Amino acid sequence: MTRLPRPTHGLILLLIIALAVASAFPLVWMVLSSFKTPEESMQTPPVWIPGSLNLSAYGAVSEVIQAGRSLWNSAVIATVTTTGILVTSLMAGFAFAKYRFRGRNALFAVMIATMFLPPIVTLIPLYRMVSAMGFSASLVGVILPNLANAFGIFLMRQFIAGVPDDLIDAARVDGASELRVVFSVVAPAIVPAIAALALFAFVYHWNTYLWPLTVLQGASEDYPIVLSLGRLLSYNRGAMNTPLVMAGATMAVLPPLVLFVFLQRFFVDSMVSAAVKG
Amino acid sequence: MPRARLSPILMIGPAAGFIGVFILVPMVLTIWLSFHQWSTQTPFSTAEWVGLRNYEDIFSALSVGRDFKTALRNTAIYTALSVAILLPLSVLLGLLVYQRAVAGGQFLRTVLFASYMVPMIAVALVWSKLYAPTEGPLNQILGWVGIGPQTWLAAPDTALYSLVLLNVWQQIGYFTVLAVAGLTQIPNTLYEAARIDGAGPVQSFFGVTLPLMRRTLLFSAVIAIINAVQVFEPVALITQGGPAGSTNVLTFHIRRVGIERSQGGLGSAMAVTLMLALIVTVFAIFAANRRGGRE
């Protein structure tokens, strides 16, 4: 970096603070509004900070969106999908990194290309296929198509390539099967990368909306929290119900946000390495 | 290794199976269906060959064509604006995060990236409130600095831009992190050489930083485009494509036609058109980058 003249330091600090405030504002406002009473919410000029930590909006919204059930469904979808992605990505990433076979680069290229395909392109036939399999309107239908993805394979290949061949060969000499090599020798050597992929997959599938909306059509007992939030739309007119709507949004936002804040080192580093190595 | 011949198949099998069945097969089916008349509620076997008629329809002067062309144009505007704002902004924010002269860079990164981690559907709900015409916080804040209330999502000529602003807010943290990754790859010796040559901060930014960020920005542009064409939640939840079709974007429109109205053939033709438009755009960017690199 070029060295900056002293007086600009203050300006830069001011700029950083201003940008952080602007960026954090929507989510901070969401949380603050969830604690307001309907009266506070309707006042003009608006009340920015609620007078007390009033939790009644959370109680009210929990019934509207069946919070317990919805959060559980989200957790099941995100956890099972993430587990599947970890297993398939580790195995395929290992093969692409450590085996030599004909067609390897072509196959890898085809798989990676799917990373750049927007889901809407395949949505219509995919919906029909999953319905024909009898999995529409069920959690199986939500989870099944997402048990492998190109990003995971790519990330695992990048990191497994750095695992020494000697380590792998030593395990083989000891009689370990290839699956054992992957899960008992290679996996422990790349824990940070696996943690990153797990977090990324969990958050992505906690947040994703288009596919569950399409496949679950009306099966509301299977709705993840992001779909249940759609029910708040009828409460979205006027300011009176703002605390209720914001309480619902906060409940959906909190799990991925907390995961991110505590584990952001893994997250950000894996994003960076994926970009730099790619 | 005697087992090496079988192992690749066993190891890649599960991943290839899922990606093949749930991504590649539907992709081929989308292309196939685009030449057929087919109701999404019936088996694929009921599809009737109609040649290019779906494509003629979606580019015709009929309402089917008008709606699709509006969605295509809205998506193009939304995508172009998103990229045009996200890329330069990500470099500026990247410089702020990367610099070590003033504390707070890492904190800024965390705050920016946090909004990328939260569900878009919740974000859409929050922003629909922020944008509210009278009691909405954004208009209140604008009022403090003497700017009159804006229409935001409520008027056809501002709704799409309001969605772009929402998108920039949500995604900027991710692109800032990519920009920082690009910045860390620039060797310090180049900056020192520039300084010895008498370059100031501005000159070394345009002479060293930007040229060496080329690969990063190319990658960012491609990802930003792919992300932007996926805009769905705020449209599906808040605007329903309105007012007056001004926020009708492709992901929303294709789903409405192909799933809700069960016009699977028409929807597939639209999806194929989107895919082709993306391929052409990405190739054009790579070609432009090549040409720029040679000069």
Image (spheres, coloured by chain):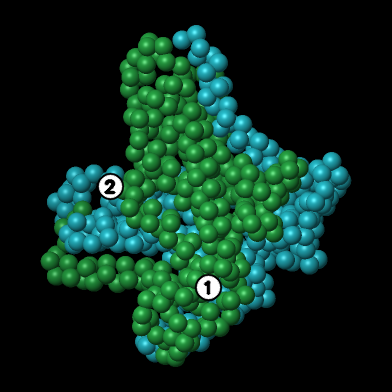
Chain colours: A green, B cyan
Q: Nearer the viewer, mark 1 or mark 2?
A: 1
**Which quadrant of the view contains residue A106?**
top right
Q: Nearer the viewer, residue B60 or B163?
A: B163
Q: Is residue B264 left or right of residue B50?
A: left
**Which quadrant of the view contains residue B77?**
bottom right
Residue in the image at 51% along x and 50% along y:
A75
Could you tell me which chain the residue with mark 2 belongs to?
B
Q: Is residue B210 left or right of residue B161?
A: left
Cα–Cα gap, marks 1 and 2: 48 Å
Q: Amino acid at mark 2?
A: Thr
Residue in the image at 47% along x and 45% along y:
A201
Q: Is residue A110 left or right of residue B257?
A: left
**Which quadrant of the view contains residue B104?**
bottom left
Q: Amino acid at mark 1?
A: Ala
Q: Percent from the top left, x then y, of residue B151? A: 54, 82
Residue marked by disc 2: B184
Q: Nearer the viewer, residue B8 or B249?
A: B8
Location of residue B20 with respect to A198 vertically, above or below: above
Residue marked by disc 1: A60
